[in-house]
Amino acid sequence: MRRGLAALLVGAGLAIGAGGAWIPAKALLAQVLLEAAWTRARETGQASPPWPWADTAPIARLRAPGLDREVVVLSGSSGRTLAFGPGHVTGTAAPGEDDNIVLAGHRDTHFAFLRELRPGEWLELESLFGTRRYRIETTRVVDERDTHWMAASGVAELTLITCYPFDAVRPGGPLRYVVHASAEDLPH
């Protein structure tokens, strides 16, 4: 089944590749393979690539229960990784650790829902070590050079980042949208 879904992913890319719909289509199809890889990781306790040539693997699942949204989180945050799902920013605390966990994602695919999040709402981050709930404290727009919010804090918190504005025509840009949340309970 994994090979069939991988072939479907490649086939869809070839069929849509000439148009701008490739990135959202690839992101949606990849989630099927990522879900299967995340299920394997939970069963075995070890992250495994979602397809044979992948240079990343699922390491967590992020849920926004109030919006009925969930996405599989990948290791790393390179452009290749973010094309398939949100990624864990290397050098920040890993999902399941008691420090500042930073996740990045594209504003027009997996992290488009960030625009709907409000302070006081909950996020859940499931890692191989359990699930932890985080209450959103702030949402803000920052300059891309302002990276202090990615620093280690020694406190269990979750920071989500994406490009801003959400409806920009061109990718990238100098602004980032940051959602900051604090852990509210112990992992379970």
Image (spheres, rainbow, N blue to C red):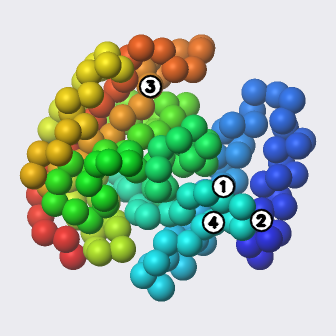
Q: Report how far apart the C-alphas of labels 2 and 1 lie in the structure.
A: 9 Å
Look at label 2 and name its amino acid.
Leu
Q: Is residue 160 left or right of residue 138?
A: right
Residue 158, percent from left and from top:
24, 48
Q: Which of the two labelled residues, at mark 1 and mark 4, occupies the earlier sequence position? A: 1
**Distance (Cα) linking label 2 and label 3:** 29 Å
Cβ atoms at labels 2 and 3 below 8 Å apart: no
**N-term mark: 2 or 3:** 2
Query: Is the residue under label 4 in contact with that under label 1 (CB below 8 Å)?
Result: yes
Of the pair 74 and 145, the residue shown nearer to us: 145
Q: Are marks 2 and 1 in contact (CB under 8 Å)?
A: no
Q: In the drawing, does residue 169 fall left or right of residue 128?
A: right
Residue receiving disc 3: 163
> Are there few (<14), some (14-19), or many (20+) residues within 10 Å of tag 4?
many
Residue type (three-letter) at the residue carrying disc 1 = Ala
Marks 1 and 4, how far apart in space?
Answer: 8 Å
- Give coordinates of residue 129: x percent, y percent: 29, 75
Residue kind at label 4, given as amino acid type: Pro
Position of residue 113 relative to residue 84, above or below, is: above
Q: Which residue is mark 2?
A: 5
Image-quadrant location for residue 108: top right
Reading the image, the residue beneath label 1 is 30
What amino acid type is highlighted by mark number 3?
Answer: Cys
Spatial CA span between label 3 and label 4 = 26 Å
Q: Earlier in the sequence, mark 3 or mark 4?
A: 4
Query: Callout 2: 10 Å neighbours few (<14), some, many (20+)?
Result: some
Task: Give coordinates of residue 142: x percent, y percent.
Answer: 28, 19
Rounded to the nearest whole Å, what is the CA distance between mark 3 and mark 1? 21 Å
Circle on res. 50: 4
